[in-house]
Image (spheres, rainbow, N blue to C red):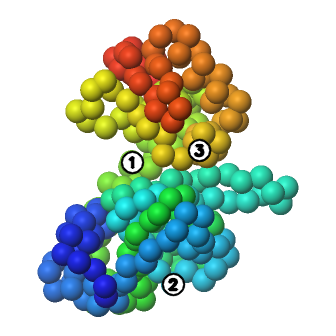
Amino acid sequence: MNMNTLDKQQLKNGYLLAALGEPEFDAVLEHSAVRTLVPGERLFDQGDPCTHFFYVLSGIVKLCRVAPSGEEKVMDLVRHGHYFAEAVMFIGGRYPVHARALEATRLVALDNQNFLGLLRGNGDLCLRMLSTMSRRMHGLINEIDHLTLHSGAQRVIGYLLEQLPEGVAPPSVRLLVPKHVVASRLGIQPETLSRVLAKLRGEHLIDVHDDTIVLNDVEALRRLS
């Protein structure tokens, strides 16, 4: 274990380990380690044995699959304060995606077998874990609905609103990843993303300055989403 006090506090606040008592949390820490990745660095590849799940302390991790044609589909962009690969831990086997750092990233690698051992020996802990993971599942269902039942424009607007920090004046979003990655995550073509942004800009709902998008009328955008 090579975590400082702030790292431990962040990890404990994550949805998955929030259900653990102090003794259980300490037992998890004994089999965990902080990893630092440079932009573009590989964490694991699709098909690698699933030995750990992860929590992002800072930075962004891209989870993607690659078609036989070579086309890349971004499945998720995992940011600070979120876990990934935890569901794979419960079914075993191999990672179903590639994981790459999009920027300088620090994350915690947590040992699967150690964590599963804790669950096997504690029925109450299992119930708490089911409760927290069920809440997470509801959030994922809402995300799937947004990606499948909404138009490309609605997906883009929803993404901008989701990324909007609280208390920022004027309301603005900084795109931390390239636009083609955002488009892939939203299930649209990069050209579609560009057209939507141009249309919103033409309607004076947003302004675009390099990688920063200013939301001129948040309420109007919410109505459109």
- Disc 1 crowd rating (10 Å Cα; few below 14, some 14-19, many 20+) is few
Q: Position of residue 173 (x, y in %)?
A: 41, 34
Q: Hey, what amino acid is under mark 1? A: Gly
Q: Earlier in the sequence, mark 3 or mark 2?
A: 2
Closer mark to the observer between disc 3 and disc 2: 3
Q: Residue under circle 2? A: 51
Q: Is residue 44 left or right of residue 80?
A: right
Q: Residue under circle 3? A: 178
Q: Secondary structure at mark 1?
A: helix
- Asked whether residue 127 appears in the rendered view, the answer is no
- Image: 20 above or below 70: below
Q: Residue at x 42, y 56 (%)?
A: 79
> Whole-Å distance between the Cαs marked 1 and 3?
25 Å
> Whole-Å distance between the Cαs marked 3 and 2?
30 Å
Q: Residue under circle 1? A: 139
Q: Residue at x 21, y 85 (%)?
A: 26
> Whole-Å distance between the Cαs marked 2 and 1?
25 Å
Q: Earlier in the sequence, mark 2 or mark 1?
A: 2
